[in-house]
Amino acid sequence: MNAKQHAPATLRNREPIAQVLARELPTSGTVLEIAAGTGEHAVFFADAFPALEWQPSDPSPEALASIAAYRAEYPGGNLAAPVLLDAAAPASWPVAAADAIVCINMVHISPWKATLGLFAGADKILSSTGAPLILYGPYLEQGVETAASNLEFDASLKARDPRWGLRQAEELDRLASQHGMTRSARHALPANNIMLIYRRV
């Protein structure tokens, strides 16, 4: 049985995300990907940034199996084996240090506790000044009109699980400040998604 999973959105968003990552990631070091899902992003980004060690993680056994299956076919040597990591439990993260953290499409499809843990974990393992925490997904922003499709998506998420839903970017800014980080950039991407970059100060 093929363990590989497929997320159709990956093919649509990986190139725009990679263009931003090229500007925001360090030139070398370890990148921890939180909630790596199918593993398709991990393989693509590891290939795009061969000087970086890409460390995928996820709390789901099915996702970890999918990541491992994609990794088995990856010819490069800079994609680490996936590790079990629950963002909501930062005290037990299996990665002691990283030079950057990337988190794609998790914040809105998880309880708020996971986002709290994400920033707490970033505070713990991003030790160098300027090390980035990079988030991608749809967000609500003060003073920015929310696309109708995002409002519909928010409603559908909350119908599936009332703990889910689009988050206010400004709430993430406040959370970042509590952990010694500040937002350094905002990048608009296709399909009403954005990338928020937080860096240790």
Image (tube, rainbow, N blue to C red):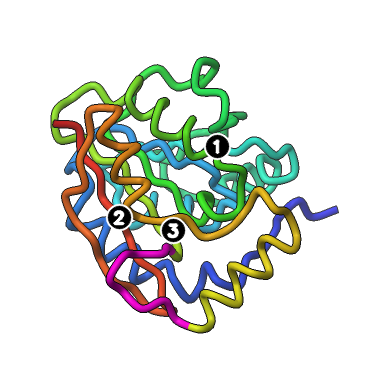
Provide the residue designation for mark 1.
Answer: 114
Q: Amino acid at mark 1?
A: Ala
- Residue at the far right: name it: 1
> Of 159 and 35, which appears nearest the observer?
159
The total of numbered circles placed on residues is: 3
Q: Earlier in the sequence, mark 2 or mark 1?
A: 1
Identity of the residue drawn at 68% across and 45% down = 63
Give the CA separation, mark 3 to mark 2.
20 Å
- Residue at the far front: name it: 143
Contact check, label 2 and label 1, Cβ < 8 Å: no
Provide the residue designation for mark 2.
Answer: 196
Say few, some or many: other residues with alpha carbon within 10 Å of mark 1 (under 14 / 14 to 19 / 20 or more): some
Q: Amino acid at mark 2?
A: Leu
On screen, residue 69 versus residue 12, left or right, reads right
Q: Earlier in the sequence, mark 3 or mark 2?
A: 3
Identity of the residue drawn at 39% across and 33% down = 119
Q: Is residue 125 above or below residue 23?
A: above
> Of 31 and 90, which appears nearest the observer?
90
What element does badge 2 sit on? strand
Q: Is residue 159 above or below residue 176?
A: below
Identity of the residue drawn at 52% across and 67% down = 10
Magenta span of residues: 139-147
Contact check, label 3 and label 2, Cβ < 8 Å: no
Question: Which percent across, then down, holds residue 201?
Answer: 13, 31
- Can you tell which mark lies on residue 84? none
Q: Is residue 16 magenta?
A: no
Magenta highlight: main SS: loop
Q: Is residue 35 above or below residue 127?
A: below
Give the CA separation, mark 2 to mark 1.
17 Å
Give the CA separation, mark 3 to mark 1.
25 Å
- Can you tell which mark lies on residue 44? 3
What element does badge 1 sit on? helix
